[in-house]
Amino acid sequence: MDRLINYAFLLLLIFLFVLEAGANVRLRIGVAILAAVFFSLIVFALNWLTLDGAEAASIFGGIVLGLGGWDITVLILLFFISSTLLSTNAVVVIKETAQAYSERKRRDGLQVWANGFWVVLCIIIGFIFNADLFFLAAAGAIATATADTWATELGSYKFGGKTYLISNFKNVKAGSEGGISLRGTVAGILGSLMIAVASVLLFSISWTTGIVTIFGAGFIGCLADSYFGATLQNQNRNLGYGTDESLLQLELDNNFVNWAATGVGALAAIIINLLSL
């Protein structure tokens, strides 16, 4: 699946490079692709990404920097570096081998697109139509991914505490999918707030727009992630398409939940911003 997404976004980037972009933008896209590949190779060498994760990150970074510019790129770096450091240093409550933990903390291609799909799509739409609203939506998706990661790592693993399933508020084990805790919620708020404050400092937007729109979208998306985890991921469901379900199976796993939640965050940013006008 991640390879199909790679091909789709790469072809779209080539299309924009050839037919849509001016000379200056073409140069920026070219430099962005080289910078993204170089950065992805470094991150791969640090064992923060798998090989297919590095491939996805190269395309993702090329689009973010080439079409979105440095402002959005800084937000992505804040999310990626903070979440990776938290994941690396987290205290794991489930027994697992060192190799299994190493593989778990290294993000693969599906994980890259689970958090980055809507970011890239919003950036592309914003670039084509020159619409700032969609760049705010991209920031909302980034705030969601950051809030969810901080809530998971700081709430579940490092500190623990009482955890409740968001769908029925029954007490569950720390780290359970769909579980929420006071510490995790506070961590999610801080993660979303970090992206919102950074957006105000980087973009030409007011504090009201940044805090209400981006922070609000990130927090809503984080809650949506917990709800989807409780109602979909915990049920071990699959979605089949076509007359023969073997044609395409979509597993409702953590990647799907993250993908859906970041989409909610992006949509929430659009709705909140339009309602506040």
Image: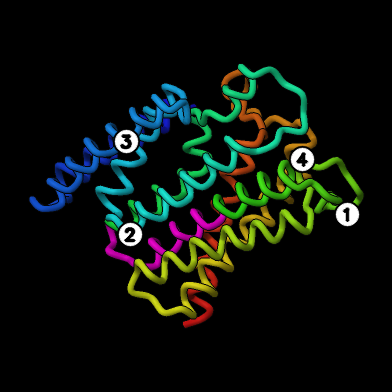
* Residue 2 visible, this angle: no
Mark 3 Cα shell of 10 Å, populated few (<14), some (14-19), many (≥20): some
C-alpha gap between disc 3 and disc 1: 42 Å
Image coords of residue 270 (percent x, y): 49, 67
Foreground residue, 43 or 207?
43
**Label 1: which secondary element:** loop
Residue on which the image places disc 3 = 39
- Asked whether, in this view, residue 76 is left or right of residue 67, the answer is right
Q: Which mark is residue 71?
A: 2
Residue on which the image places disc 4 = 175
Residue 40: name its quadrant: top left
**Label 2: which secondary element:** helix
Q: Which residues are magenta?
A: 128-144
Q: Which mark is residue 169?
A: 1
Q: Residue furthest bottom?
A: 277
Q: Residue furthest left?
A: 23
C-alpha gap between disc 1 and disc 2: 39 Å
The kind of residue tagged 1 is: Phe
C-alpha gap between disc 4 and disc 1: 15 Å
The kind of residue tagged 4 is: Gly
The kind of residue tagged 2 is: Asp
**Lower position in the chain sequence, tag 3 or tag 2:** 3
